[in-house]
Amino acid sequence: MKSSTERRLTTAIFGATGSIGKQTLSVVESLGARVDVLTAGSRDRELEDACRKFMPRIAALADESAANRLKLALADTDIKVFGGDEGVVCAAAEADADAAVMAISGMAACAPMIEASRSCRRICMANKEAIVAAGDHLLSKIKEGGAELIPVDSEHSAIFQSLSGGRREDVSKLILTASGGPFYGKKRSELEGITPKMALSHPTWDMGPKITVDSATLMNKGFEVIEAMRLFSVPADMIEVVIHRESIIHSMVQFRDNAIIAELGVPDMRTAIQYAMTYPERMNGCAGEVDWKALSKLTFGVPDTDAFPLLAFAFEAARRGGTYPAAMSAADEVAVGAFLSEKLGFTDIFDIVKETADIVGHPGQTSFEDIVSADAEARLRAAELIDSRA
Ligand code: NDP
Ligand code: MG
């Protein structure tokens, strides 16, 4: 059988102008892969640049007027341009790719992801909010669609890789590592005056603004706990979070004999993106090697859930199930947006997320429609709670 590089891997990149999207394009360039589809939200200039460089068959922007500008700008090419949310979904339906990288942030990824699972062979899943909110429904729709799903989030990629070290029935624990973010070691009272600028400087990973703030509050790690439960079908009490400041160990799997298998490397998302695209093959990587001489030690600690309560709350939301995770995720998106536009304090994010999820979330069996309406209601409630604080 020909290797995927010999066949020239074909990709479709959803969210191509974001942090994961751009890193995916860097991997595509290094692999010499073909690009069939490129989509984004509203940044038409950035998408135009990427289109000119990678010459996809189809491009789409969720924002209609940005899509109209892109159509004009690309009039000298054969690239088909779609606009609006339906345009992004159409691009997903028409995609013909070995690997569709799902790097749209938030719930907007749901519909294109379901379409791409019908049209493409594999979903390389970076998006986490949709998995947290609608996980089991979404995963079964992807399965129905016929695509295989490979995780891109570095922790889940590490677990996916480490699971091959033993039998599934012998797994006793998934151990997620967390850098602890820029405010690791601070007490709750010391977090009051944190500004967006301070929150946006992550010590080890270079990411988009929303996930960088989520890393600073540890909400991101909470989401990743639920993401791991969904992707690997394990209960919350089989997951442990360990602080590991250096982000060299990307996560681990413990087996019943207490042996642990881990995946290590420099903190560079391109390794996980590339692995998801080329699995089970491994190609030359674009990320650097670990410099063992420069690295004097690897450190570990326990998360401080008094200072960073959203991690413990995510475990609680996971146990309650139903629409709690969806309400928590939607409220967080609104609260982080308000924090970034300086309408909300850093520690107020904790309160808005918990209060909203307690009002909107319900345990028990849920349909996909229940999740979508809990998401919408949580956005309204969170905005009201934020306004009432102003
Ligand atoms: P960014 O905010 O940097 O990028 C988001 C992308 O989605 C952009 O291309 C944006 O387009 C597009 N987009 C936004 N809204 C819509 C919409 N309504 N319809 C279509 N496209 C839209 O995010 P990241 O790249 O950081 O993260 C992407 C996803 O991957 C998130 O779910 C995140 O949690 C997850 N993730 C990210 C990691 C990272 O290292 N960054 C690590 C692990 C997971 P535009 O630029 O035009 O707005
Ligand atoms: Mg991660």
Image (cartoon, rainbow, N blue to C red):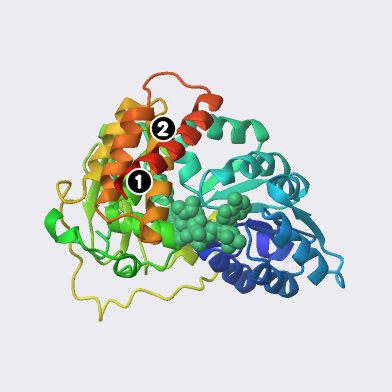
Instruction: Give the number of callouts.
Output: 2
Q: Which circle marks residue 214 in the picture?
A: none
Q: In which quarter of the image is residue 231?
A: top left
Viewer can see residue 152: no
Mark 2 Cβ and ligand 2 under 8 Å apart = no
**Residue 110 horizontal/vertical position (percent):** 58, 41
Q: Can residue 163 be seen in this view?
A: yes
Mark 1–mark 2 distance (CA, rounded to whole Å): 35 Å
The residue under label 1 is which amino acid type?
Ile
List the residue tagged with mark 1: 386
Q: Is mark 1 within 8 Å of ligand 1?
A: no
Q: In this view, does 102 lie to the left or right of 324?
A: right
Nearer to the camera, 115 or 143 = 115
Q: Which residue is drawn at 27% across and 46% down?
A: 350
Left/right placement of residue 125 relative to residue 86 reads left
Q: Residue 4 location, x and y as percent?
A: 67, 59
Identify the residue at image location x=79%, y=71%.
Answer: 73
SS label for mark 2: loop
Q: Residues within 10 Å of mark 2 (few under 14, many from 20)?
A: few
Which amino acid type is marked by label 2? Ser
Provide the secondary structure element on which disc 1 rests. helix
Q: Which of 230 and 162 is in front in this view?
A: 230
Q: Quadrant of residue 144?
A: top right
Few, some or many residues within 10 Å of mark 1 (<14, 14–19, 20+): many
Indicate whether 227 appears above or below 158.
above
Ranked by sequence position, the earlier of labels 1 and 2 is 2
Disc 2 marks which residue? 233
Q: As displayed, is residue 219 above or below residue 32? A: above
- Residue drawn at x 35%, y 58% is 213
